[in-house]
Amino acid sequence: MTAELLARGPSADGNPFINYVLPLAASDSLVMDCVLAIGGAHMAVLEPDRPQLEVMTRRHYARLLEGLRKALSSDTVCPFGERDEDKKLYTLMILIMLCIFEGVQGDNSGAVYHHIRASRHYVMDLAADTYEPSASKKTEHIRGFLLEIYAMFALKLSVTPRGLQEENPVTLDPFLGSLEFLSQYKSRGFMIGFGHGLFAMMPAISNLVEKRRKEELCGSTSDDLFESYQSLLEKLDSFDPSSDVLEGEDACPRYQQSSAVAIYRTALILILHSAFHEDMYKNAELLAEVERRIDKILPLCWAVYASKSPLRRMMLWPGSILASCCKKPEHVHAFRLGLNSNPRSPGGVREAAKAVELLWQDDDPRAYGPRGLNMVMKKHGLSFSMC
């Protein structure tokens, strides 16, 4: 059940969590601790009245951290081989599993940001042009599997309100400016199964948003950045969702992919608006535009949420961004229902739903949009993954 929840799309190799990770766990105790910690975290969220599940999960988590310490010091047997690249791949796998664990259990202290920053050290080598592929096809499959998960986390975290982690932005490396490199792996699409062109725009968007934040801290703003903002807005508005889909019999239907792209596109536009309009909450013209965009995208949100497509498991981030911009009661009701509709959702979904609810209930007029969500998260000491 948990493995099915983790995959966000189909692939030519099925579900890699089942076909790659579980066989490895059968022969490697540290990977087994990863599996049991993640599964236990999910069960503990679903059955909070069984404290023994939390105890068991914490036991495996402690073993996982101790195993990571040994892997970092090369004081453990690597199942992939003895090359430096193999050991880096193994360490990256443990770090990526920790990212997944934090999302499933619903950590709200910002732990995922620490894990993804640590992962970057290994990803830089494993994604480099000078990397020498392993002779083992199994190892190369796992490399592609991990790089896709890393890309999903890093890209989405870079455009997520960080709350307590606001001063620690996620650094994106140049290779994430295109996801074409994923096409060489059979697992392509299991995590980012749509919108590779749109995802490739996220580094530019996150970089611009961060520059704007630093400008505001210095008490000045520049025309050059505002022009870049307008240029990106035009690019997003002219972006054709139906053209940004993965092809092949193993991909989700085009209409599902294009709906997901349209939803993400709208959320990215709202991220940009919020970053470049400190007074967005009282800008009548901009508020009217945002309401029109939500009116237009809401039916697509419902279509994706109501479908059995695995792409619906990618909707937490855009759903939270869109929900933060809701003022009309019918919009609030729709997103409240969507964020709380699945009783089997992992902890990260529940944390996002709580944060958005705190924003809606906050009397401060600035509690609006991604900027307002970030403010509310800081006020309540929150920082978590919306991935």
Image (tube, helix red, strand yellow):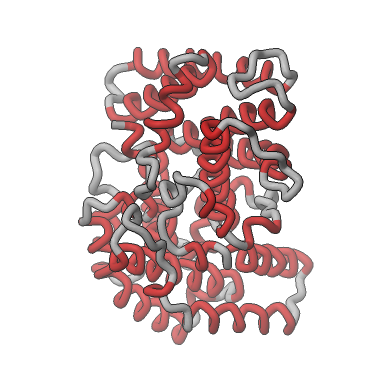
Q: Name the image quarter holding the N terminus.
A: top left
Image quadrant assignment for residue 226: bottom right
Nearest to the observer: residue 136 or residue 220: 136
In the visual, does 357 lie left or right of 284?
Answer: left
The residue drawn where x is 68% and y is 36% is 118
Q: Position of residue 267 (x, y in %)?
A: 45, 67
Q: Position of residue 14 (x, y in %)?
A: 35, 41
- Which of 174 and 111 lies nearest the eye of the viewer? 174
- As drawn, which residue projects farthest toward the bottom? 285
From the top left corner, tell me how far across and down residue 93 is, in percent.
57, 31
Residue at the image position 24 percent from the left and 68 percent from the top:
330
Horizontal arrangement in the rendering, residue 301 relative to residue 72 (left or right):
left
Residue 81, percent across and down?
Answer: 65, 22
Q: Is residue 167 above or below residue 131?
A: below
Query: In which quadrant of the rendered view does residue 326 lie?
Result: bottom left
Quadrant of the rendered image containing residue 35: top left
**Is residue 230 shown to the viewer in this render?**
yes
- Left-right relation of 58 to 12: right
Residue nearest the observer in this picture, 86 or 306? 86
